[in-house]
Every structure is written in C-alpha cells, then in structure tokens.
Image (cartoon, rainbow, N blue to C red):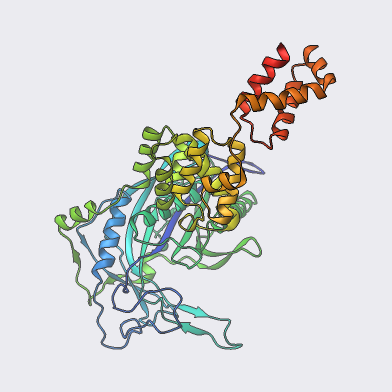
Amino acid sequence: MASLMKGRTGDWEIVIGLEVHAQVTADAKLFSGASTAFGADPNTQVSLVDAAMPGMLPVVNEKSIEQAVRTGLALNAQVNLHSVFARKNYFYPDLPQGYQISQYEEPIIGEGEIVIDLPEGDSKTVGIERLHLEQDAGKSLHDQHPSQSYIDLNRSGVTLMEIVSKPDMRSADEATAYIEKIRSILRYIGSCDGNMQEGSMRADVNVSVRRPGEALGTRCEIKNVNSIRFVRQAIDHEAARQIEIIEDGGEIDQETRLYDPDRGETRSMRSKEDAHDYRYFPDPDLLPIDLDQGFVDQLKQTLPELPDQKKIRFTDDYGLSPYDASVLVAERETAEFYETVAKGRDAKLAANWVMSELFGRLNKADTAIAASPVSAEALGGLIDLITDDTISGRIAKDVFNEMFETGKDAAAIVEEKGLKQITDTGEIEGIIDTIIADSPDNVAQYQGGNMKVIGWFVGQVMKASQGKANPKLVNELLRMKLDA
Ligand code: ADP
Ligand code: MG
C-alpha cells in the first residue's frame, strides 16, 4: 500500500526507518544499583559508577539482559548467545564518562520482524535490524538559571534498548502504526512502560525520498521525537523539504535534524557522524555476555500471549473483524476488560459497547481503562439487561452514562428510575389507541399509502412511554392496528 507524495515533477515515495529507544523497566541501572524511578529530585539517584568517578567498575544488571532477551523473543528476532559491550566515544555533556557504553558489532538481538496494523484491517510486516543495550544519558536543564545550564544525572546510566527497524515503512501512517505496535509489545511483556510523555520511549526518525522503483535516497535522521503525533508531523515536513530540494536540482546532505513542533519544521543540528567517527571498541571493563540456550528457552516460557496471537484468537473465538480485534488487543488491560465483558455474552455486542460507549466516555474523561468507573462486570450486567429485554438499547445508553457518573450498577439504576422496558402488549396497545384516536390526519395519510408516517407514530408512542416501550412490539402493534 505505497502511498505516494505528489511533487511538482511527479510522484515520490517516502522511505522511513525508525530507531526506538525504550527505557527498560528495572529497579536498577544498566551498570549500577542506583534507582531508576521517574520524578525523583535531581541527582538523588546517582551512584559513583553513574557519576563516572575514577576507578569505578561497571557491573551488568542481569534484569536488563533478561528484559532485552524477552523483548527480542517478542519481536520474533534472533537472540545472539554471544554479545559484546562497546564504548562509543562522543561528548555527551550529561554522561560524565565521556563515552557511552553501547553495543555495536555484536548486539544482543539480531534480525526479527513484527506485523503492524493499518487502518481498515490491513497489515504489513516490518523488519527489525537489531536490538542493542546501551546507557541513557542524563538531562541538561537550560531553563533554571539565566546564564548556566544544570545537569541532572538521575537518568544517566539507565538501561535503554535501541530497537532499529529496517527502512521498510512508506508513510507516516505506517511509521506511527509501527511505534504503536512496538509500544504495545513492550507493554505486554513489561520490558518498558512505553510512556512517551515521561521520555521512557523516544524515536529517531530516518527519512529519505525516492522516485518509485529507484534506489534508496540519502536519509536525514530526526532525533529524539517524543510523541506519536510529532513523529507523524516530522515525517511529513521532512519529506516535503527533501522533495523540494531535489526538485530544485539540489542534493540531500546526510545530517541529523531536530523537529520543532512550534514551528512545524525540521532544522539541521549537525552533519551526521559515520560510525568510524565514534571509534567504537570493546569495553575493557566488561566481559562479553555469553548466554546459554536454556536461559533463553526459560525466558520464552515467561512470555504472555502477545497482541498478534490474541488478535487471531479474538477473530476466531469471538467472530470480531480484524480491525476491531486489533483495537481491543492493543493494550493488555483493554483485552482483559473485553474478555470479562464478553464471557458468556454476545461477543460482538460486548465489543461494540467497549469500543464505542466505554472508549468514548473514557476518552472524554481522559481516564485509563484500568481506572474506569464502570467495571467489566458492571458493563456485562448492563448488556444482560439488554439481551433479556429488560431495557432497550436506547435506554441502555442513558443507564450507561449514569453508571459512569455514579459508579452504580445497571440493575439499581433501572429499578430506581423505573426504566424497565414495557413489554406488556396491553399497555402499549392502550398508548397506541390514544394516539390513533388523536391523529386522524396521520391515520388517513398512512392508509392513503404514505407508509413513511409509521415513523411518526413510532416516535409518538416512544415519547408517550418515555422511551420505555419495546420498539419491536411498538412497530408490530402499530402496523396491526393501522392496517386493520
Ligand atoms: P545510525 O546509528 O547511523 O543512525 P542505525 O543503523 O542505528 O544507524 O540506524 C539507521 C536507521 O536508518 C535504520 O532504522 C534504517 O532502517 C534507517 N535507514 C537506513 N537507510 C535509510 C534510507 N535510505 N532512508 C530511510 N531510512 C533509512
Ligand atoms: Mg542510531
């Protein structure tokens, strides 16, 4: 599904590869025991190793290795039993070592692939180039003092997984679907919380353009994009910028750029280093990581059912469309919520209620499903009242709103407000008779062949019954009486 971009001189294809940096969920940093909790006071979570005091020795945190391996397995990727930490020499103002410990030629995870979910239920496979472990840098704060920068080393040394994709994406839609899928997988297995606002997941976005069918063009890398919306905007702006340059007869310089969301443009940060500029070499303070297959196999056993497997199960077992299934499995909590609602009930009706009414209200209230004021059991209870004809689908929406606001259960609200559906034919007939007697004109119209007035009659009966008459019965009885 190549979506081409129109230029002055014809069509262009956008080529995108992403490097996702994901902070590993672990109590300690990659090479020290300091805490990694978010939001602590500056420089309170810094060990002597993180501060790069002379003579300190890094010791690798086993939990970080486990999380990287589990993530590799979940990305259907090759786990390399032998991998090596390397020094990447570069001046990071907020990483006092003067180099970053990363992995280069021998990363812990090799090639893999994931399936991304596109609008209208389409999907596409995107290749993973590798996943390696590295240290995060600290943070420079430029807004605390008029002429000085402050440095917070809390984040310095925290474990990052850098997940590098192949240049397989062809549009901003595909790139955002990729990030959403990576985030979903990481959250399922608990290796990263995927929280882009807090910076625990960020992306470097590589963009180039080419004429369809031609070789790959020169890429620019847009660094550290921290929201899905900005990824989308950065790609569109960067592609348009490159197309304009090439159409004007220019060439793209391979460079590192920054996206400025306020101005909606990317700007050059520096010309791109080549790998040899970093003078990578194996870190002499660290042994290579040698895993045995048994350890990997054991971790494989700890993986939960992943989103793609769940999606297939949801389409098979519940008869959901691939699109609905992909929405419901995107977050583990949502999938669990849905399954509780659907258990022993009409699965499609359950999906509709979760996806339209519940999601709608949660979005409006900016509330996560885990904090939903209507529990899965309570929503199930409401659906039961619809299926056993106690209330109509129409009334159910009002009841749901009330449940959301008060936290009461459906049966209590129906009882309290007297919302039980009227299924007593005698009572409905009584209402119909009154309306027919009061509106001879409309009766004449109907009997003269204008079948559409039936809608007017239904409306009147529903109004007179305060929405409680069973609509199916109303229709049947009305036709019976009017046709008589
Ligand atoms: P670097 O560290 O130099 O950024 P990496 O190998 O870590 O190199 O990442 C390169 C990223 O750029 C990968 O995600 C890859 O898919 C992507 N990429 C490579 N060539 C192109 C291209 N021509 N257009 C777009 N993306 C590309
Ligand atoms: Mg990179």
Left or right for 298, reference 449: left
Query: How far from the left and from the top, in percent, is residue 427?
Result: 65, 28
Residue at figure coordinates x 48%, y 38% from the top left: 384
Query: How far from the left and from the top, in percent, is residue 461?
Result: 71, 29
Residue at figure coordinates x 29%, y 60% from the top left: 68
Residue at figure coordinates x 76%, y 25% from the top left: 434
Left or right for 144, reference 48: right
447 in relation to 19, above or below: above
**Do we see residue 107 in this rendering?**
no
Q: Quadrant of the C terminus?
A: top right
Left or right for 47, reference 181: left
User: Which is more toward the observer, 358 or 327?
Assistant: 358
User: Which is more toward the observer, 59 or 10?
Assistant: 59
Q: Quadrant of residue 133?
A: bottom left
Query: How far from the left and from the top, in percent, is residue 41?
Result: 46, 82
Residue at figure coordinates x 26%, y 78% from the top left: 58
81 in relation to 154, above or below: above
Query: How far from the left and from the top, in percent, is residue 468?
Result: 64, 35
User: Which is more toward the observer, 155 or 208?
Assistant: 155
